[in-house]
Image: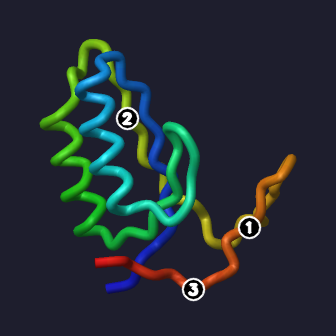
Amino acid sequence: MSRSLHLLCYDISDPRRLRQVFRMARAYRVAGQKSAFECWLTPGERQALLIELERIIDRRVDRIHCFALDPRSRVRCFGRARSFTGPPFLVD
């Protein structure tokens, strides 16, 4: 099953939940900063990640968004950012 690029963003109000969400998201990211990560995910990995994050967050005050990015879109970098030029990979 092929992976596609997703943008995972979150806004978590509690420091303990924030650390848990960060650790979970960090396991899948290939790039990102603060609370926005680029992740190469299969449909199954995306579903498993979102189910696990749903268990951690408080839906009344926390927000998580996972956007599938269109591979045809042109990458635009501003400031000191650089495009990821390597092939998709997963570190086990």
Q: Pick whichever of labels 3 and 2 is earlier in the sequence.
A: 2
Classify residue 54 as left or right of residue 15: left
Q: For residue 87, which numbered disc appears in the image?
A: 3
Label 1 near label 3: C-beta < 8 Å?
no
Pinpoint residue 68: horizontal percent, then vertical percent. 49, 58
Image quadrant where residue 60 sits: top left
Q: Does residue 81 lie above or below 9 as drawn? A: below
Per the image, the residue denoted by label 1 is 83
Per the image, the residue denoted by label 2 is 64
Q: Helix or strand or loop: what does disc 2 sit on? A: strand
Residue at 47% across, 40% down: 9
Residue at 56% across, 60% down: 31
Classify residue 72 as left or right of residue 59: right
> Of 46 and 20, which appears nearest the observer?
20
Q: Helix or strand or loop: what does disc 3 sit on? A: loop
Residue at 63% across, 83% down: 86
